Image (cartoon, rainbow, N blue to C red):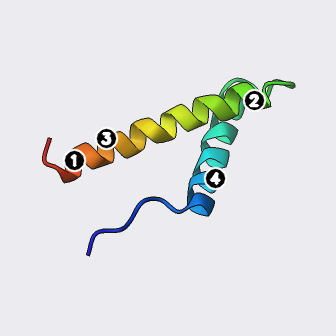
Amino acid sequence: MKPGPMEEQERRERIEELARQIWEAEGRPNDQHLRHWLMAERLLEAELQAAAGKERGQ
């Protein structure tokens, strides 16, 4: 059975992880939380789309 859509908690944790990685890669700047969060959301969507494409054999 295929896994279902990403659970909200799992999604939030992945976004937090990506946002932290972005923050660290940028040298841990202050006052960039929202920008990092939004970037992480976009990265997660790209990851999910790529995974969906692989599942469909694209």
- Residue 50 badge: 3
Circle 3 crowding by C-alpha within 10 Å: few under 14, some 14–19, many from 20: few
Is disc 1 placed on a helix, strand or loop? helix
Instruction: Please report contact status of discs 3 and 1: CB closer than 8 Å, yes or no.
Output: yes
Left/right of residue 14 with respect to residue 33 in the rendered view: left
Could you tell me if the residues under marks 1 and 4 are in contact, i.e. CB atoms within 8 Å? no
Kindly identify the residue that appears in the image at 69 percent across and 23 percent down.
26
**Residue drawn where x is 50% and y is 35% of the image:** 43
Q: Residue furthest bottom?
A: 1
The quarter of the picture where the N terminus appears is bottom left
Question: Is residue 10 left or right of 16 when viewed as pictured?
Answer: left
Q: Residue 12, labelled with which disc?
A: 4
Q: Is residue 32 above or below residue 20?
A: above
Q: Which residue is mark 2?
A: 34
Identified by mark 1, the residue type is Lys
Image quarter of residue 15:
top right
Name which residue type carries label 3.
Answer: Ala
**Disc 4: CA contacts within 10 A as few (<14), some (14-19) or many (>=20):** some
Mark 1 Cα-neighbour bin, 10 Å: few <14, some 14–19, many ≥20: few
Judge from the rendering whether residue 39 lies leftward or rightward of residue 48; answer left or right.
Answer: right
Label 3, secondary structure: give it.
Answer: helix
Q: CA distance from mark 1 to mark 2?
A: 30 Å
Where residue 28 appears, x then y in whole percent? 78, 29
Q: Residues under labels 3 and 1: Cα distance?
A: 6 Å
- Which tag, 1 or 2, sits closer to the chain's start? 2
Q: Are marks 2 and 4 in contact (CB under 8 Å)?
A: no
Question: Secondary structure beneath disc 4?
Answer: helix
